[in-house]
Image: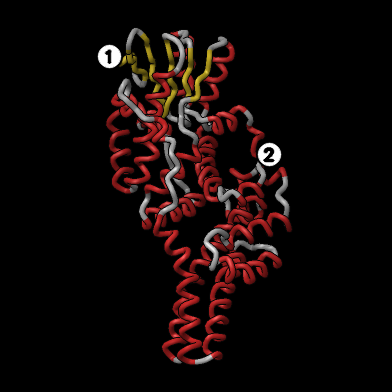
Amino acid sequence: MPELTAIEPNVDLIEHEGRRFFIVGTAHVSANSADLVEKTIREREPDTVALELCDSRYETLANPERWQETDIYSVIKSGRAYVLMAQMALATFQKKLADEFGIRPGEEMHRAMQVSHETDTNIALVDREVRITLKRAWAGAGFWTLIKIVFTMLTSVFEKQEISQEQIESLKNGGELAMAIDEFSGALPGVKTALIDERDQYLAAKILAAPGDTVVAVVGAAHVPGIKTCFGTDIDLAKLDEIPPPRKIFKIIGWGVPLLLLGLIVAGFIVSGRETSEQMVLAWVLANGIAASIGTIIAFAHPLTILTAFVAAPITSLNPTIAAGWVCGLTEAWLRKPRVIDLENIAEDLTSVRGVWSNRVIKVLLVVVLANLGSSIGTFVGVGWIVSLLGNG
């Protein structure tokens, strides 16, 4: 069994099979954490520095200009618009803290990378790929939890939150941290499993697999208790890396709607004749088209994008493999091509209403989300409208 020793506040030593692992618990926006990371690496002279980063997050830190290389077309086509929005929301929150305390987000990781390069120390990336984590969190959340997450993301962009340096530092301590995690668990249990519990296991296994007799691991303080509990246990990384299949309920709804619509139109034709079935088709087109168009209007989309929403939504609502938001987002991106300055200013623009609606990258993503939302609302309205026509007939 691993032997655990608290070396100093926020630094724990795990000794396992003749190897030493120094676990440094940090806050991602903390100058003190960055100093502690540098001090620990220089004092312990590890063979490897293990970072709570995946390949994509490491590239983002190592290459701050990476936003400029974002291919918005590929993001939309691959269905990653929502993942990108989640990453942007997190980056915006961290920027708010960084602006307030005068330190860039992830400074402790920057410092660890810098010192590792200076001392020619091996770096190991030990976190799970962020896209897998977000997809597993999304799959583990219930319907109302998803609604709560989306609402919180939208409101947090404009919410003025005050948080002190003392509060940030206190969250690295056991009592405060445990209370925060317990509160998070109660509010979003399925999400907490993917974001914290599974990653505790993943980090523990990857840190143990890092090469060398002495390893310094730099991780968020929230993961330290779980890492210590999981360390040295049998952990199936392949299982933790699995992307869950789409929920059956969404697949059933996706194919059920067109079948239901077809059945209602046929029933309308049989019961009330051709005129009623034509009215049903018109009701479907108007409900979907208008609702999706309203979504793009709210996003201040280009007039041709609004027209595209009206035309595409009634069709895409009958095909689960294509979303109205994808078509509208690609149209908007083609008409108003994102500029380098839009990519550079994403975090800044997300902090103001004017910035959100003027940034072309954010606008494209808003078009995707709001067109999809409008089309979904239009689907329910359209089905109800068609049912009422059948009843009247």
Disc 2 secondary structure class: helix
Location of the N terminus by quadrant is top left
* Percent coordinates x, y for residue 269 in the rendering: 50, 87
Q: Amino acid at mark 2?
A: Glu
Q: Is residue 277 left or right of residue 237?
A: right
State the residue position of label 1.
3
Q: Quadrant of residue 212?
A: top left
Of residues 228 and 73, the one drawn nearer to the viewer in this rendering:
73
Q: Is residue 182 left or right of residue 159?
A: left
Q: Is residue 154 left or right of residue 248?
A: right
Q: Is residue 213 left or right of residue 343?
A: left
Q: Residue at x 41, y 21 (%)?
A: 207
- The way the protein has been coloured in the rendering is secondary structure
Of residues 361 and 316, the one drawn nearer to the viewer in this rendering:
316
Q: What is the distance, in whole Å, between disc 2 and disc 1 at their CAs?
A: 45 Å
Location of the C terminus by quadrant is bottom left
Rendered position, 370 above or below 59: below
Q: Amino acid at mark 1?
A: Glu
Q: Quadrant of residue 4?
A: top left
What is the number of the mark on residue 69? 2
Q: Residue at x 53, y 40 (%)?
A: 91
* Percent coordinates x, y for residue 147 in the rendering: 41, 57
